């Protein structure tokens, strides 16, 4: 029976924890029933601790374990008696089952529970004795005192873990005893208390154990930390706290306790901010110097710096609103008071939750709370603040934050999940901007809840045809209306400039370039143009503010209307004056008074405009205009010209910077306007004049519009493409100039100087000095020139531990073999050799080359040495062998032996001085010496044994004989005495009788090294072989010579955090995922083994396996399986890879701290000590670890980790495993807790921080309650915002979970942080941009295109944006933010729904508007993964383009467009929304051109003109079209990429790379992505619908089904591509051109674009042309097309469901109207083509067009007959079939009769199809836009049938060519080669992978 019981208990335990057995969760075992307490009980952390202890002592005493379980059960019962919380019932049931099993296991008999307490007390004593508790602590202290660098490190770790476990269990036992009874014997009570005091570090803390002082954590002993802690203590004059306020015994009350009591902040918020403030103060103090006194004090300057930095935004807010800050005189504020203010601000911020996005609202709260606090400070005893009091107690969260949160949440709920118009609800910015005016004080304090600000909106109407929203309070100061007019509204200066320049150039061109008075008069028409365009802008101001009038400041509204009045009057007046002046001029003998008046007006107005716009933008003059602000007229003019906001004040740059970007733009503009004038406008002048005067044109259709208006439509079709190109070609010029500029900047910064292994080797000897100068500055005492060698050796000794650690990490990452690692290691250089010892890979085989040179040489000694010295490393190898051999022989030999060595060496040196070495020595016999020395060293390398010693003696004797008889040719008389003694000793056998075996570590190392130098014969010039290892070493060594700020010592460096948002992506591959086969039978593991074969072998070697081991052999060992999972995960885009990379920062800081510990003393003394550069055990040094914790924090914000834990998802177990492996890793998450309140289940949200625990679980550090669900806006920024309170330091680096980092780059982070204090312009930097390396480029050709495109932007592109343009923003990760600057100004991203979908870039906007400065640095890089499949890339580009569409509407872009000076505004425009607009314009140009050509062809105008003169074939249009063609195929967009390649790879490799990309059809890819960007950008501005796309980050080598591609690209590419094809066919059929060549030249770019859009998804689809796959795809596609769908059916299952989803974005009345207008273009085809049919002859009446509609109606009727619903026709099936047959016969007969009896020809039938197909599509599009109306009319089913027919037709048009090519097997082979060229070049069996022909039977 007992066996069954045991199994039952195991089953229950497993059910409770649902642990996944098997390979999925190999790692730390999650034991027992603890760890999964339901969240609704999680408020009581004791339950979990009790169950863990019960688990721990289960085997020792099951009875006590049972007592603990019962106590845990009773606690759970008390917390939730009715088991109403989520998961509580299951938990209790399981726990009760476990208890019952424990009872059943006992011997027969009842349990006397009255003895439980006694048992527990007894067990407590026994447990203490058994574990030697008293000794445990003593032992550990001894171990610590024995020195952290001894060999006891592993022992120390083990003992610490054991002690923690023991004390943890004792603490629980003591706590349970205390809860069960109060009658504990006094002695036992004392013991329990003393044990509890020893569990300090079991009290969860984050970095500094403030609530539990510890002697085991070195961080508390740092003077700056102690100074910061003491600075926060209670000061005199602070009201006393009441006696019942609890403060831990381990510390005294401080300022934060006072604030905690007064305002009711949460306990964990107070603890969190206490540590935050202490770290800020400590790090600020460490930069000023470490306080030395016994009781360290904080410097006033450190407090002042933190105070001003933290409250800078508050001070600016007060100044803007012209109110007095809470202090009247800052100088009079004491240090303690400043700390009180800072503490209060951070406590408010720490608990503000979503309100952190409203920084000025926080300023308002702070302002009022300080005033309230001032009242309390006047009292003797602290009182709770009125604003935070309620009947439930004192709570800041409930009384201050929750009311704000509720109104923000109500507005967010009203946005209909992002579908509502932005104008219908208030977003975060609207709430925040309310606090930009003094009206905010109407909210009073405590909150006046009746204020309209707190008014919640009414729910929105669901009526689909109504666009109106719910009623509520209006927007604040800006409304995000969805319209393209925002582009004009935000950047009106650019458009005015372009229009006026075009007008001016056209006037000059039409006057044939003559600059006479007539031309001048016409040019002056620019005046009216300018004011009319300004008038349009003022009209837009009025329109765009609709929706915010009721809430916007009256002053701002009056300004808008004043401007409107001013520009309406000015435009009317100026236009009138100008017209009048022209009229007067035309009269004979006129005296042009009016014209002079006009000139005066224009002059004055233009002068004032120029003065204000130009002078206000030059920084030097900016101060001057500010001085004039005291004159009300100047103030009025400035206010009229530019609205003043709280943000965007003083947006000017240094004069030198201004001149730089002005020159940049003048170069671009001069090129652009020269091109426009000479290539676009001038050639069109003559044709335009002829067309205008042309009359009596014969139209081939019924003409409505073109009579008596000088052929306006013809003019439009001629000029429209030119104007479109005029608007977009400025981007082409920008691209080219910025590429060249970026190239030159990169060359100046020394990028790409080391781009090969050869360069690494040649320059290696310069690395130590360069490294020391920048990365590890040491105050050396080496000064005189004679000590150069000593200096070089000192540098090498300091450099070698860093270099070796880099190499070691490359080996751990499996990029190097063990042999390569040995070759790359650099000797310590701390020995007594008088030279620098270089790594063996530089010196290998050099000795043999030198020996050959010497043996063959007939030259003099000097010539021989000169030949050897040509290769520096050969020279070094010879010198080192010479000195090493002397050192070794001298050390191992004694007496005469040593004398022999000295004599020989003296003689050699003598010969060298006399230059007779080649005479006195037989150099051709050197090989003999080398072989004897090698034999000796080979023996000395082995263990010390008698036989080895004999062998060594023999080897030395052999060496003696060779030297004596074969090599030496000297006169012994010179040293007769010495030689005599030596010879005598040799004959007597004494000479080498005794050897001193090398025991000293330095000597051993020298023996080993010399042996290597003399035995490695192969050259190591290609070491390392791995391409990634090469790339990293090349970049790192190159960066040493780049300009970077020198690093400060670790204790003075700025502290920083790394911050990674994570949702539910892959953390760590499980074995199931690695071994799961895809449809081709390929597993991820097999794929990785093939793509990284060398790394797989290195991995096997690292875990001690043979390189040919099959992976199945690893499954026996859990540790090997875990290593395998990590190996695979480190090659994907996983969280494990990111965490490993970011943890290198900590490792680097620890190493730097450890190696700096000697620097305080004399460097020469340090050098002489061997351990100065010994890095053994640096990771376990308490001081190094504490210093790293002080300077670096890593927080991963895993939003749903709590939910994943509850559901026992593998992700949760893997995150816990990462925390186990990385002690400094912190995980923040949102915990959803259900609690019972008044019998109702209430959901509460907590922001929690956890760390790894010794038990393999996570340990909760902080839990801060939130006012409600934190996800009100976009997910990622909300996820960042909830966790940002747990970050620390001066800076914060935002890292995505698909990034990587490298140890060698982490060494440079100190230098990067110093940039915050470097001069980068008029303002200090607030965001430091960092270079990225895209590591996914090797997967496929698509991945490499994406990678190259991305690399070009993140290097060359951003380099130019930062300098000279000064408009670099934040484009995602890995930028470093000035943390305090950003957290006090709204955070590191914006979160309003949909508008902030590209949340990252808004951090850049916000930083720039708030007077930040964004820089870019390229001496450091971070890895980045990118999407690798076409569908992933398209989704990503769609997301970014949609995000840019939303940016167009945003207030940030509007303000930047308004407030930047003209040149910076242009830079900003063309590098953000303008890039997407120009992309869209590129595509529209093709449409404009083709529709223009279609008009000329169909109307007959083209024919007439062709006959009269060859006008339309003018060079202007051809030039314009060629420019557009070049741009469209991406030639110009490729310029930055080519120059980037040249800079970083060299010219030849760049050319090869570029040609390879062209052969891989990169042009097709770039053209295709042009369509993606255009579609999503345009659609977003028209209809909205931008959304976050989770693109997936896996390895994409799977075949994508035809239907999947069709769904994704149908509307964005295929429909548009087919429309272009249709236009081209119409032009081919009816157009007029000189032969086929002219047609091809004019349309080749359009054909290329159309075909790229139609076939790229299939061209770049793995196995896209494999016949078997094509057959399956066709079956799948037809099933999808014909499946009817229904409720709950997804788009990927049914065409009907997909079609409904595709129409979902058309929601508003405006959207429906716009869609209808756009769809009208499809009716042009029918109107034009019917008049071209033979059947109508020359008839151009409207009757013909009317008849065509009748024919169309008949066709639709026939279609309806044939698609009549089968469900309805069940009862008259036969009749229906008869009618269908009859209809078909009649239709065929009618057609035949028409062909025979009338002029209808066969071509006419095809032409009719060409006419009716677009008309049908137009009808379909309009019907879809008005879906609700069509449904009401009952026509929806017919429309749907028609739409299905169209999709079937489009699909077949695309499918047939693909199926045709699939017949030929070579096409599939070619396509595979094309897609996977990168992989082929690495020897990848990709064809095998794709075919699924998997030979690896183990998988």
Image: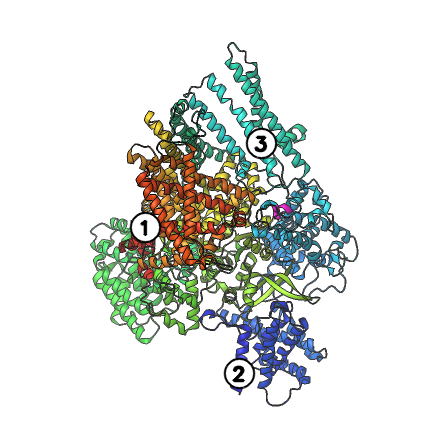
Q: Secondary structure at mark 1?
A: helix
Residue 1093, placed above or below residue 1808: below
Residue closer to the observer: 365 or 881 = 365
Which of labels 2 and 3 is toward the front? Answer: 2
Mark 1 neighbour density, 10 Å: few (under 14) some (14–19) many (20 or more): few
Judging from the image, the colouring scheme is rainbow
Quarter of the image for the C terminus: give it.
Answer: bottom left
Q: Quadrant of residue 1744?
A: top left
Report the magenta residues as a range.
424-431
Q: Where is residue 1781 drawn, in percent x and y?
A: 37, 53
Mark 2 neighbour density, 10 Å: few (under 14) some (14–19) many (20 or more): few
Residue closer to the observer: 38 or 28 = 38
Q: Where is residue 607 drawn, in percent x and y?
A: 56, 24
Residue 247, placed above or below residue 1336: below
The residue at 32%/52% (across/down) is 1874
- Can you tell which mark lies on residue 1857? 1
Q: Main secondary structure of the magenta part?
A: helix
| CA–CA distance in space, label 2 to label 3 | 84 Å
Mark 3 neighbour density, 10 Å: few (under 14) some (14–19) many (20 or more): many
């Amino acid at each position: 029976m007992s066996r069954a019981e045991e199994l039952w208990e195991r089953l229950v335990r497993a059910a409770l924890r649902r642990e996944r057995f098997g390979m999925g969760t190999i790692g730390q075992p999650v034991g027992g029933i603890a760890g999964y307490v339901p969240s609704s009980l999680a408020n009581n952390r004791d339950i979990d601790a009790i169950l863990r202890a019960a688990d721990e002592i289960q085997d020792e005493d099951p009875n006590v374990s049972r007592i603990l379980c019962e106590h845990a059960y009773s606690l759970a019962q008390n917390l939730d008696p009715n088991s109403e919380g989520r998961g509580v019932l299951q938990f209790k049931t399981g726990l009760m089952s476990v208890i019952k099993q424990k009872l059943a296991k006992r011997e027969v008999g009842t349990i006397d529970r009255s003895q439980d307490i006694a048992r527990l007390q007894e067990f407590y004593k026994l447990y203490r004795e058994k574990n030697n508790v008293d000794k445990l602590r003593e032992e550990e202290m001894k171990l610590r005192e024995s020195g952290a660098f001894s060999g006891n490190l592993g022992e120390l770790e083990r003992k610490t873990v054991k002690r923690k476990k023991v004390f943890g269990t004792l603490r629980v036992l003591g706590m349970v005893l205390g809860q069960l009874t109060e009658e504990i014997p006094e002695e036992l009570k004392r013991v329990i208390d003393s044990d509890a005091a020893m569990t300090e570090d079991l009290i969860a803390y984050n970095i500094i154990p403030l609530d539990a002082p510890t002697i085991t954590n070195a961080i508390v002993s740092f003077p700056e930390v102690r100074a910061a802690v003491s600075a926060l203590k209670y000061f005199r004059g602070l009201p006393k706290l009441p006696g019942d306020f609890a403060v831990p015994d381990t510390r005294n009350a401080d300022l934060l306790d006072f604030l905690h009591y007064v305002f009711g902040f949460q306990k964990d918020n107070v603890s969190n901010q206490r540590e935050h403030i202490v770290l800020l103060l400590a790090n600020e103090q460490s930069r000023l110097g470490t306080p030395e006194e016994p009781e360290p004090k904080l410097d006033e300057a450190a407090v002042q710096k933190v105070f001003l930095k933290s409250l800078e935004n508050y001070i600016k807010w007060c100044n803007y609103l012209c109110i007095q800050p809470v202090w009247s005189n800052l100088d009079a504020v004491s240090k303690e008071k400043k700390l009180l203010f800072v503490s209060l601000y951070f406590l408010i911020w720490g608990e503000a939750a979503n309100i952190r996005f409203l920084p000025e609202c926080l300023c308002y709260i702070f302002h009022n709370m300080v005033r309230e606090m001032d009242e309390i400070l006047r009292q003797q005893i602290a009182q709770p603040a009125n604003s935070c009091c309620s009947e439930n107690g004192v709570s800041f969260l409930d009384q201050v934050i929750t009311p704000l949160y509720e109104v923000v949440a109500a507005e967010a709920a009203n946005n209909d999940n992002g579908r509502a118009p932005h104008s219908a609800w208030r977003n975060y910015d609207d709430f925040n901007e309310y606090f930009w005016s003094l009206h905010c004080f109407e909210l009073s304090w405590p909150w006046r809840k009746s204020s309209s600000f707190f008014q919640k909106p009414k729910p929105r109407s669901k009526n689909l045809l109504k666009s109106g929203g719910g009623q509520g309070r209006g927007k604040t100061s800006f409304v995000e209306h969805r319209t393209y007019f925002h582009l004009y509204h935000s950047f009106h200066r650019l458009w005015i400039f372009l229009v006026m320049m075009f007008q001016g150039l056209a006037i000059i061109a039409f006057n044939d370039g003559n600059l006479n008075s007539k031309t001048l008069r016409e040019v002056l028409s620019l005046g009216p143009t300018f004011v009319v365009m300004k008038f349009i802008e003022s009209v837009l101001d009025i329109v765009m503010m609709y929706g915010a009038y009721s809430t916007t400041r009256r002053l701002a509204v009056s300004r808008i209307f004043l401007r409107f009045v001013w520009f309406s009057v000015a435009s009317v007046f100026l236009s009138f004056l100008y017209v009048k002046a022209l009229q007067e001029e035309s009269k004979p003998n006129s005296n042009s008074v009016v014209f002079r008046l006009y000139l005066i007006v224009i002059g004055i107005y233009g002068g004032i405009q120029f003065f204000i716009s130009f002078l206000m933008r030059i920084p030097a003059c900016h101060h001057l205009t500010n001085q004039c602000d005291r004159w009300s007229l100047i103030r009025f003019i400035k206010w009229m010209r530019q609205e003043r906001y709280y943000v965007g004040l003083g947006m000017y740059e240094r004069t030198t910077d201004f001149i730089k970007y002005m020159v940049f733009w003048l170069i671009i503009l001069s090129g652009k306007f020269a091109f426009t004038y000479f290539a676009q406008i001038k050639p069109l002048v003559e044709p335009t004049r002829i067309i205008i005067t042309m009359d009596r044109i014969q139209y081939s259709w019924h003409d409505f519009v073109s009579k008596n208006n000088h052929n306006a439509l013809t003019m439009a079709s001629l000029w429209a493409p030119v104007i479109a190109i005029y608007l977009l070609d400025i981007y082409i010029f920008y691209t080219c100039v910025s590429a060249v500029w970026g190239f030159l900047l990169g060359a100046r910064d020394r990028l790409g100087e080391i781009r090969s292994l050869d360069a690494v080797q040649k320059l290696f000897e310069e690395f130590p000095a360069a490294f020391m100068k920048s990365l590890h500055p040491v105050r050396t005492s080496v000064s005189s020139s004679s000590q150069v060698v000593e200096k070089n050796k000192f540098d090498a000794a300091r450099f070698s531990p860093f270099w070796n650690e880099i190499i070691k990490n490359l080996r751990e990452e499996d990029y190097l073999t063990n042999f390569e690692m040995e070759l790359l290691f650099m000797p310590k250089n701390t020995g007594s050799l008088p030279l620098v010892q270089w790594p063996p890979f530089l010196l290998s085989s050099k000795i043999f080359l030198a020996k050959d040179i010497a043996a063959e040489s007939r030259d003099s000694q000097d010539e021989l040495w000169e030949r050897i010295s040509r290769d520096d490393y050969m020279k070094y190898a010879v010198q080192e062998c010479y000195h090493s051999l002397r050192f070794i022989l001298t050390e191992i030999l004694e007496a005469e032996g040593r004398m022999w060595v000295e004599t020989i060496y003296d003689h050699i040196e003598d010969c060298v001085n006399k230059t007779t070495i080649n005479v006195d020595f037989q150099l051709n016999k050197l090989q003999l010496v080398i072989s004897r020395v090698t034999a000796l060293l080979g023996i000395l390398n082995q263990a010390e044994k008698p036989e080895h010693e004999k062998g060594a003696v023999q080897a030395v004797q052999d060496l003696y004989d060779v030297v004596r008889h074969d090599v030496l040719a000297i006169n012994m008389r010179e040293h007769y005495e010495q030689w005599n003694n030596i010879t005598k000793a040799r004959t007597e056998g004494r000479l080498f009788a005794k050897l001193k075996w090398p025991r000293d570590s330095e000597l051993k190392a020298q023996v080993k090294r010399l042996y290597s130098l003399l035995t490695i014969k192969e050259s190591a010039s290609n070491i390392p072989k791995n391409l990634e290892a090469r790339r990293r070493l090349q970049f790192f060594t190159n960066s040493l010579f780049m300009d970077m700020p020198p690093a400060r010592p670790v204790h003075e460096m700025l502290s920083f955090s790394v911050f990674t948002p994570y949702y539910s992506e892959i953390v760590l591959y499980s074995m199931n995922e690695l071994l799961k086969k895809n449809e081709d039978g390929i597993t991820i593991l097999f794929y990785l083994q093939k793509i990284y074969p060398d790394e797989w072998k290195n991995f096997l070697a690292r875990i001690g396996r043979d390189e040919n081991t099959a992976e199945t052999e690893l499954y026996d060992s859990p540790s090997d399986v875990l290593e395998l999972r990590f190996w695979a995960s480190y090659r994907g885009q996983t969280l494990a890879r990111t965490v490993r990379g970011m943890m290198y920062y900590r490792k680097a800081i620890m190493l730097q701290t450890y190696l700096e510990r000697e620097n305080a003393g004399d460097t020469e003394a340090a050098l002489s000590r061997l351990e100065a550069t010994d890095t053994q055990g640096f990771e376990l040094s308490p001081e190094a670890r504490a210093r790293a914790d002080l300077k670096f924090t890593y927080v991963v914000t895993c939003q749903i980790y709590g939910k994943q834990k509850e559901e026992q998802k593998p992700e949760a177990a893997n995150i816990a495993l990462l925390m186990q492996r990385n002690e400094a890793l912190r995980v923040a998450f949102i915990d959803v807790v259900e609690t019972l309140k008044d019998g109702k289940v209430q959901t509460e949200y907590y922001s929690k921080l956890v760390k790894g625990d010794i038990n393999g679980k996570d340990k909760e550090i902080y839990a801060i309650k939130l006012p409600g669900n934190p996800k009100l806006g976009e997910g990622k920024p909300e996820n960042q915002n909830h966790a940002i309170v747990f970050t620390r330091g001066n800076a914060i680096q935002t890292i995505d979970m698909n990034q990587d980092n490298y140890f060698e780059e982490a060494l440079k982070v100190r230098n990067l942080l110093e940039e915050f204090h470097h001069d980068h312009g008029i303002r200090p930097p607030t965001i430091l941009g960092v270079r990225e390396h895209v590591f996914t480029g090797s997967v496929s050709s698509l991945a490499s295109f994406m990678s190259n495109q991305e690399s070009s932007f993140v290097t060359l592109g951003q380099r130019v944006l930062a300098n000279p343009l000064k408009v670099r923003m934040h484009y995602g990760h890995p930028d470093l933010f000035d943390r305090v600057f950003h957290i006090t100004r709204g955070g590191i991203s914006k979160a309003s729904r949909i508008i902030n979908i590209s949340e990252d870039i808004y951090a850049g906007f916000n930083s720039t508007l708030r007077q930040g400065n964004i820089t870019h640095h390229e001496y450091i890089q971070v890895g980045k993964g990118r999407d690798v499949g076409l569908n992933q890339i398209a989704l990503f580009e769609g997301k970014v383009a949609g995000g840019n569409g939303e940016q167009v509407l945003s207030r940030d872009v509007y303000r930047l467009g308004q407030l930047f000076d003209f040149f910076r505004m242009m830079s900003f425009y063309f590098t953000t929304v303008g890039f997407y607009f120009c992309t869209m314009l590129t595509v529209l140009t093709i449409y404009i051109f083709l529709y223009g050509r279609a008009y000329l062809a169909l109307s007959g105008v083209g024919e007439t003109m062709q006959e009269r003169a060859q006008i339309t074939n003018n060079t202007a249009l051809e030039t314009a079209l060629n420019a557009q063609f070049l741009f469209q195929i991406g030639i110009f967009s490729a310029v930055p990429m080519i120059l980037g390649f040249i800079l970083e790879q060299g010219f030849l490799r760049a050319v090869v790379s570029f040609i390879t990309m062209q052969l891989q059809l990169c042009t097709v890819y770039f053209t295709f992505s042009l369509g993606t960007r255009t579609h999503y950008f345009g659609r977003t501005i028209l209809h909205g619908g931008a959304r976050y796309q989770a693109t997936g980050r896996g390895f994409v080598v799977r075949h994508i089904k035809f239907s999947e591609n069709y769904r994704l690209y149908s509307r964005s590419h295929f429909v548009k591509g087919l429309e272009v094809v249709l236009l081209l066919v119409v032009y081919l059929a009816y157009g007029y051109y000189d032969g086929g060549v002219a047609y091809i030249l004019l349309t080749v770019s359009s054909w290329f674009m159309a075909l790229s859009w139609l076939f790229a998804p299939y061209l770049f689809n793995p196995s896209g042309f494999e016949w078997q796959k094509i057959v399956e795809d066709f079956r799948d596609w037809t099933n999808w097309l014909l499946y009817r769908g229904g409720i709950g059916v997804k788009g990927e299952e049914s065409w009907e469901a997909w079609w409904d989803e595709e129409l979902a974005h058309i929601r508003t009345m405006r959207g429906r109207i716009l869609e209808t207008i756009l769809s009208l273009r499809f009716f042009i085809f029918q109107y034009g083509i019917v008049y071209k049919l033979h059947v109508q002859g020359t008839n151009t009446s409207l009757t013909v067009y009317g008849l065509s509609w009748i024919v169309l109606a008949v066709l639709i009727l026939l279609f309806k007959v044939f698609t009549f619903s089968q469900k309805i026709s069940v009862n008259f099936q036969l009749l229906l079939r008869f009618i269908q047959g009859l209809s078909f016969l009649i239709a065929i007969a009618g057609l035949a009769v028409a062909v025979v009896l009338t002029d209808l020809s066969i071509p006419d039938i095809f032409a009719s199809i060409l006419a009716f197909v677009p008309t049908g599509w137009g009808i379909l599009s309009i019907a879809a836009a008005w879906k609700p109306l069509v449904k009401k009319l009952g026509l929806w089913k017919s429309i749907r049938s028609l739409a299905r027919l169209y999709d079937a037709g489009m699909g077949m048009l695309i499918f047939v060519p693909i199926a045709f090519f699939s017949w030929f097997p070579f096409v599939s082979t070619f396509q595979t080669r094309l897609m996977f060229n990168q992989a082929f070049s690495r020897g990848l069996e990709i064809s095998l992978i794709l075919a699924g022909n998997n030979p690896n039977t183990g998988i």
